[in-house]
Image: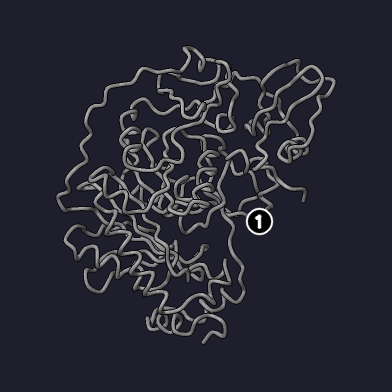
Amino acid sequence: MSNFLPNSLVKKLGANPLFNTAEFIRVHEEAQRATAIRLNTRKLEECPFSSKGMVPWCNSAFYLKERPIFTLDPLFHAGGYYPQDASSMFIDHIIRELKVESKPVYALDLCAAPGGKSTLLNSSLHPDSLLVANEIIKPRVNILQDNLIKWGNANTVVTNNDPSAFGRLPGYFDFMVVDAPCSGSGMFRKDVDAIDEWSEANVKLCSERQQRILAESIAALKTGGYLLYSTCSYSEEENEDIADWLIGTGDFESIEIAIDDNWGIEHTTSVEQTAHGYRFYPHKLDGEGFFITVLRKIAEQSTFNRKRIKPEKSDVPKGILDTWILDVDEFFPFIHHDDLYIFPKKYENDLKYLQNVLYLKNAGINIGKLNRKELIPSHALALSNVLNPNVQSLEFTLEEAQNYLRKENLTLEADSPNIKGWALAKYRGMSLGWMKILPNRINNYYPKELRIMNL
């Protein structure tokens, strides 16, 4: 038995005669973790690091030979990729197996921070989908917002609500991801402190909390919609037992997802309802501990009344977006606290519905601040995928880009292009943020709260 892993957990796992307890303990003792990144394919098409190969269940993800210092990489700050544990990228495979990406959907990531699964959904779902990413904890919702701003898409809404608030949106969503708070045993290699915090009592508390979260929110899923429920726990009480409970209510049926035997993913079936589950063990694949199950809602669900809303007269100055935005006609602009935003026009009414029910942290893309009918462009606009490519810019070397990200003073070389006014700082063709070029100096507009420290 392990000297440092919880003996009761190891004993339960080892009760399965096919479970290799010795290998499970060994990988935790060695603590050698795989590093993987998932590309933002709207910004970056090739892996920027030396790769050991692709993550087999995700179309845009790579295992890295070494873990770089992501903080010092401008491509990371530009939203070119997201470092994420490979196990949780399995959601990309599920979406393709269910063919959910074939048409636009309303999607909800209920427990979304820090944003790994939300950015994955933003890439894997149909690009015309609407994604609502929710986080109940205020400091964590800021991190979620920052990561989705880096990803650069306008079809997202970030909310800061208790899961029960979504019960006021019955039948609203086609697709729902609940990566539930859990006892964290799957993260023992990543977070050693989690070992000391783990207990069977905490597993029970987590299971009860998971049931509460689901009970208070699943009305938001429409009839025929898919629920992806996941944890980073090894305990059946938080995994298969939750699937049994959901199916036992009569509201859901289990969906089997085809997997390749060579991937090392363990296909399980629950005791009571034979619900299909998928377990990821670090001694069987390059990833941390993870569980996921896919359920389809079969119960008749009342639906939110999407009543027609009379459009309001826009107070956005006419033509102000033309210089900055591609495909202006696809978006509707609105002003909130002197900031100008854009949001997909096809979801204009939906934004108003969501505003009436939820606390919205961010919606669409903040374009900038209006100052006497002049636009001061925002950092979110610089990182967005809607920015007009004709906006003037300067390409930086790695050292120059790092200095920019540190918010240091910038100077123009003698042979630099003759440009004045607002310009993008770019590295390898990707936008990092804004600067304003004046006759005798350059003002660095990289956000102070995001600047990197000298390492």
**Label 1 sits on what residue type?**
Arg
Q: Which residue is mark 1?
A: 67
**25 or 180, which is in the foreground?**
180
Instruction: Name the residue at 44% across, 35% down.
Output: 363
x and y, in percent, of residue 31 in the image: 61, 71
How many numbered discs? 1
State which quadrant residue 258 falls in. bottom left
Question: Badge 1: few (under 14), some or many (20 or more) residues near its Cα, within 10 Å?
Answer: some
Give the vertical position of 266 relative to 45 (above or below): below
User: What percent of the width, then of the height, locates residue 101?
Assistant: 35, 40
**How did the renderer colour the structure?**
one colour
Q: Residue furthest left?
A: 300
Instruction: Work out whether residue 270 or residue 425 is closer to the camera in this orientation and state it.
Output: 425
Above or below residue 307? Residue 150 is below
Q: Residue at x 40, y 34 (%)?
A: 127
- Toward the right, the furthest residue is 414
Element marked by disc 1:
loop
In this rendering, would 204 be left or right of 430? left
Name above or below for residue 393 compared with residue 135.
above
Kindly tell me whether residue 121 is visible in this rendering: yes
412 on left or right of 321: right
- The outermost residue toward the bottom is 1
Residue at 40 percent of width and 23 percent of height: 332
Q: Quadrant of residue 232?
A: bottom left
